[in-house]
Amino acid sequence: MRAVAVECFGVDNVSVADRPDPTPGEGEVVIATEAATINPADFGLVTGAAASRLPWGAAAPYTPGWDLVGRVVDCGLGVDRSVVGRRVLGFTRLFDTLRGTQASLVALPVGSVVEAGDGLPSTQLTTVGLNGLTAWRGLADLKLAEGETLVVTGAAGGVGGFAVELASSRGFEVIAVVRGDEKQDVLGLGAAATVSADDAELGTAVRAVVPGGADALLDTASIAAASLAAVRDRGKYATTTVLPAPERGIDVVKSEVRLDAEALTTLVEMATSGRLHTPVVKTFEVEDVQAAYKAFAERTGRGRIVLKFPAD
Ligand SMILES: NC(=O)c1ccc[n+]([C@@H]2O[C@H](COP(=O)([O-])OP(=O)(O)OC[C@H]3O[C@@H](n4cnc5c(N)ncnc54)[C@H](OP(=O)(O)O)[C@@H]3O)[C@@H](O)[C@H]2O)c1
């Protein structure tokens, strides 16, 4: 099989290499990958910035990738063989499993994949994997109650965009924090209002929209302490990135993505029925992986960069 390989850190060193085909262990399926996203954590692995998140004793070469869409081609003991041939969306917590999805064949536990249906191209559907699940987890960690207001920072990003769409579709009033000219984009995702991240005082800007401060905030843009100012006293705050020191009785949590097959199934249904946008800024053949990671470093605006794998 062909797999993205990080032998030495640095975008100029990322390559694609031949590797032995995986054999499915008990309870596992092998998937022939059609598409897999590139995310900040993958970029961090390639550059070495996220090397400290690798498990103790892990040895290069590493293969990045947290999600994929592809077809099941084999299965191990204890798995119903009727799964072979099915098109699936798969997710893995890369820094726990080291089963990177940026490979032409990937073995994953059968519980890590859900039916992908045939409604969306693989390059689009794979974008709901890591990013959709992270947004889902962030909202779950906030335990929003009916009628509460939510601020999402990085609202035009991969995770933030899904958080805006999911929360809006559940009836919450979402204030989307963006920088640049992405306001129309996030209004199109269902945000009730937008605030510019370039405002010196983010707290003041949000409080102009929600007097007294928002009930909850999901930070996906590493704004940390400055974004806490947008939350009311004793409100709720979750971050996918940097944890600020708590203040004013605000409940502050670090949100960590985890496998949730039920959520993944709902994300597939929502994306396939057009209730979630799945923007892709550019796709690259896996053999052009270096160009893909260079494009990732220079990306602007909403949408993922996705690696495509040739069909056999
Ligand atoms: N904890 C977890 O389990 C978990 C899981 C997945 C991701 N993450 C992390 O969550 C973060 C977001 O991931 P992502 O995939 O959504 O990234 P992304 O697609 O790059 O989106 C990040 C967004 O935040 C914006 N942004 C960045 N810095 C900002 C600042 N100082 N002020 C205002 N806006 C800013 C970016 O704007 P520009 O486009 O203008 O740069 C972009 O719209 C990353 O740090 C990622 O590593 C954590």
Image (cartoon, rainbow, N blue to C red):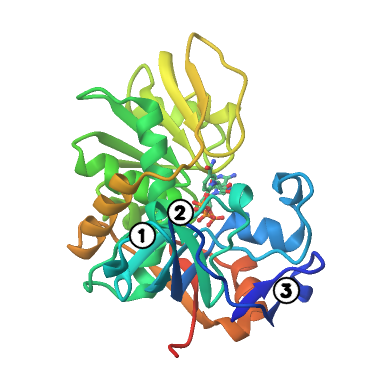
Q: Position of residue 70 (x, y in %)?
A: 39, 73
Pointer 1 or 2: first along the chain: 1
Name the residue tied to disc 2: 130
* Residue drawn at 75 percent across, 67 percent down: 61
Residue matched to label 3? 14
Q: Residues within 10 Å of mark 1 (few under 14, many from 20)?
A: some
- Residue 268, by quadrant, is bottom left
Q: Is residue 203 left or right of residue 211?
A: right
Q: Which mark is residue 79?
A: 1
| Amino acid type at image mark 2 | Leu
Q: Decide: is 103 above or below 43.
A: below
- The residue nearer to you, when weighing 265 against 217, is 265
Which type of secondary structure does the marked residue at label 2 adopt? helix
Secondary structure under tag 1 reads: loop
Asked if the residue under mark 3 is in contact with the one under mark 1, i.e. CB atoms within 8 Å, the reply is no
Mark 3 or mark 2: whose residue is earlier in sequence: 3
In the rendered image of this protein, does residue 69 appear above or below residue 197?
below
